[in-house]
Image (spheres, rainbow, N blue to C red):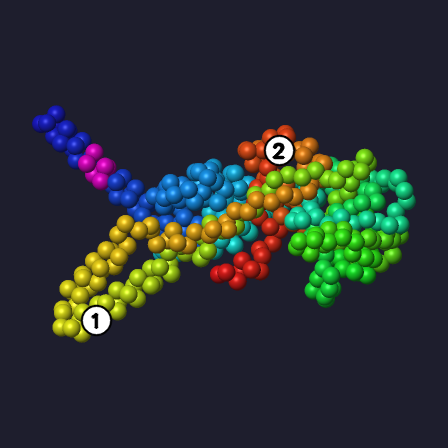
Amino acid sequence: MVCIFFPFIFFVFLNLSFNFFLFLSLSLFSVSSRLNIEYAQLSKRRLKLLVDADHVSGWDDPRLFTINGLRRRGYTPDGINNFCRDVGFSRNENVIEISRFEFHQRKALNESSRRGNAVTGRPIQVVLTNWPDGKVETFEMPNHPKEDYGKRKMPMTNVVWISSSDFREVNSKDFFGLAPNKEVKLKYAYNITCTSIVERDETTNEILKLNATVDFNNTNKCKILTWLSNDTSGNPPRTAEVRLYEHMFTCPVPGHKAKIAARARMDARTKELKDGGMESSAAIIISTAEEDELWKGKPAAWLSDVNPNSLNVSTHMFDSSVFEYADKPFTTFQMERIGYYVVDPDSTKEHMVLNRTLTLRERKDKKNMK
């Protein structure tokens, strides 16, 4: 009797155990909603559409939120993990602000990135008219607030370079850069005062060259600019290709505007049919079918929100230490006063390529896009 009854008990136990663990697993996997982030797509099906339609260069494009794309953009595992801990789990469908993700990335990159100097945009040459002939002075600059990273040396001659965004012909109270007859401090070096505009581009009228004088005593406390200088042989700083990435989409939730417009068309059509005597359920079915037919054979509505200016390729000047330590892909740098950069796998010794990960702070124009 026991021999006959035991297999039955064992079968019931296995069946109950299986049902219990099945219920437990389904409960665990159904407690959270899908993670959605502004200006991004996390659906594999939609990511494939972006790749197949050549909106991006591939699955590892830095604009995509794939593992390889995030790595190539310069985002760190610590930043991603901290973001996920901050967001947590939720049963409700929601869209997380991209600024929260970028906050954790900036915090992580600030801790791990080596510092460097760069001149962005079209550089402006500044000739120091009272600099002694042939004089070369070397300044030491920290590679990181932590002393473990050491220091880098940068020469200074009678020709220095600043970013075009750091000069204006007309000064204002909210502008901290250089202007005619205005004094600023070159970081870790001397104060300079612009005395004249020497050269402009004949086509664009952009300023190319300035004259300035140096205050070797740093008498006044001034706003600070980053800079680069010609080397001891008189050669300008080396340049590298820089890929400047913006949001992949022009609106926080891709396709949201098209969805609202489609809903408005369907509601208007449904009302028209109902006013003509059709039953409500039939009117809804017809208006839905007509809307589906309208989009038949056309690209998905959310693809119309792809940002055509999400990638711009530029050239920046960098100090020599950046080239010295940029021998491996995915090495990250913080260019002082500018932002975070990472060495792209396309980079070679002859042609360095950097991707801009993030600016140091969230730009005001991005805030206004939301």
Does the image show residue 294? yes
| Residue 347 sits above or below residue 37 on the image | above
Q: Which mark is residue 351?
A: 2
Q: Quadrant of residue 259?
A: bottom left
> Residue 173, percent across and down?
72, 66
Magenta stretch: includes residue 137: no
Tag 2: amino acid: His
For the residues bearing labels 1 and 2, Cβ distance under 8 angstroms: no
| Outermost residue to the right | 132
Tell me which residue sits at (77%, 37%) in the image. 235
Does the image show residue 113? no
Q: Quadrant of the N terminus?
A: top left
Give the SS element for disc 1.
helix
The residue at which mark 1 appears reads as 272
Q: Give the magenta part as a residue range.
A: 14-19
| Outermost residue to the bottom | 275
User: What secondary structure characterizes most of the magenta part?
Assistant: helix
| Residue 172 sits above or below residue 124 on the image | below
Tell me which residue sits at (56%, 60%) in the image. 365
- Comparing 334 with 289, the one in front is 289
Mark 1 vs mark 2, CA separation in Å? 63 Å
> Residue 331, percent across and down?
60, 36
Tell me which residue sits at (89%, 50%) in the image. 130
Q: Tell me which numbered mark, 1 or 2, is placed earlier along the sequence.
A: 1
Give the SS element for disc 2.
loop
Magenta stretch: includes residue 16: yes
Tell me which residue sits at (31%, 48%) in the image. 30
Tag 1: amino acid: Glu
* Label 1 CA crowd tier, 10 Å (few <14, some 14–19, many 20+): some
